[in-house]
Amino acid sequence: MMLDSATCYRALRARDARFDGRFFVAVSSTRIYCRPVCTVRQPKLANCRFYPSAAAAEVAGYRPCLRCRPELAPGNSSVDATTRVAQAAAGLIEDRALDSAGLEGIASSLGITDRHLRRTFSAEFGVSPIEFAQTQRLLLAKRLLTDTSLPVTEVAFASGFASLRRFHALFRQRYRLQPGQLRQRANRKAIQVADVLSFELSFRPPYDWPAMRAFLGARAIAGVEMLDDLCYRRTVRVISQGKDHLGWVEIGLSPKKTGIHVVASSSLARVLPTLLGRIKALMDLSCNPTEIAGVLGELAQRRPGIRVPGAFDGFEVAVRAVIGQQVTVAAARTIVGRLAAALGDPIQTPVETLTTVFPSAARVADVTVGLIARLGMPAARARTVIALARAVADGQLILTPHTDLDTTLERLRMLPGVGEWTAQYIAMRALAWPDAFPHTDLGVMKALKEKDARRVLEAGEAWRPWRAYAVMQLWHSLTKE
């Protein structure tokens, strides 16, 4: 958004949650920066400076507010090409890609030059990618010191610092506090028992939690996922530097805040940036429902705040999409459950029914067509599953929100047995593309009372660039309340 001071100050005075994460306000008299929803006494306009990112505020010499905690602000989704590239780069940086691939590697994965990436990134966030990465490490460390009982050394390495000395020095420089001092000032009630990590992740209201639960619940894979009246739980695999980190997460609506509450096993402490990024994508926390409702109009009034469920594991969602071709949601769920049971990794969790981690692409790529087909699908579809697994395992296909959309869709369509519906469904969930539109979907056609897919495609033009959200509204319109 354009940082018009008058508009930002009005949003600040109203503590308007629609602007949370879209800008940060720094106060020259205190040298502290806040979210626009902060409940502290509001400063005079003359003392306010507005920044597009927390990193920009910190580079300008401000430290984060301990009350509103800028590290908890929701992210931003966009369909603007330039903004989306910058946001994708930010996601990759949060996922530690800068450490492993460097700026040139990130730019290459996005199909642009590193020079263009620097220019685009600076225009979006007001800082360089390096400065942004440094702030993200510090904010994650601040969160871990506040919300967990992890030792300071583990906090430093979990946040991406290669040296404990560097962590202490930068923390003192930026925040004018020792890490231990921040922990002493934190709310001790937030510190949890060992073996469990808990976090709050924010969103912009409204958020249709019942619709999210219903969607995920109907597709929950036996042994891998489960839902009860309050929470969604699942096993997870995060691959970092060639090593598998297995664990479990629990996600529920926070009772007091505009956010979700996340509990995770301590086995995932070393991959927290990736873990939290995937949960944000799964729960579509960067969505701006007001902006979307303005385009969808009457359609959005059916379920205000509806989200597009993303993917914790893009490969898992892609396999589901392939298996779900021409079968019901319930039938696909059964077959995917058999695949997980046959090829997944066993895991112990506090929940008796969570026993299996969904198999990796490399594991599925190594099995025979006959084995996959015996799980209950035609041989042609089994060949598609294996071709998909091999493309992901070889790195030819990257199924994350931070990949190049056009290239990924082209590679998906080249796989045997992957048509437009499958590609669009994967784009909608695994790639988090808000304008994905599986116009041949039978549910979409039924909701629109239309039998001609071409006319469905024409009708969808009115909902650009948020057609994926229109699809969610149409699907939910078919369910009984």
Image (tube, helix red, strand yellow):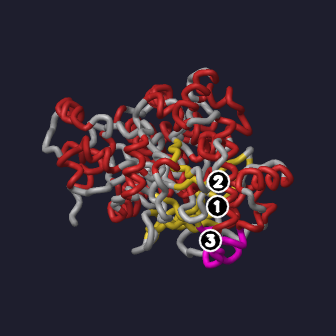
Mark 3 residue element: loop
The residues tagged by marks 2 and 1 sit, at their Cα atoms, a distance apart of 14 Å
Which of 167 and 302 lies nearest the eye of the viewer? Answer: 167
Decide: marks 2, 1 in contact (CB < 8 A)? no
State the mark number for residue 349: 3
State the mark number for residue 143: 1
Q: Is residue 246 left or right of residue 336?
A: right
Callout 3 amino acid? Thr
Mark 1 residue element: helix
Write down the residue under mark 2. Answer: 63
Among the 4 quarters of the image, the one containing residue 158? bottom right
Q: Which residues are magenta?
A: 183-198
Give whichever of discs 2 and 1 has the lower sequence position.
2
Give the foreground label among 3 and 2.
2
Callout 1 amino acid? Arg
Q: Is residue 437 left or right of residue 245?
A: left
Which of 237 and 431 lies nearest the eye of the viewer? Answer: 431
The residues tagged by marks 3 and 2 sit, at their Cα atoms, a distance apart of 39 Å
Callout 2 amino acid? Arg
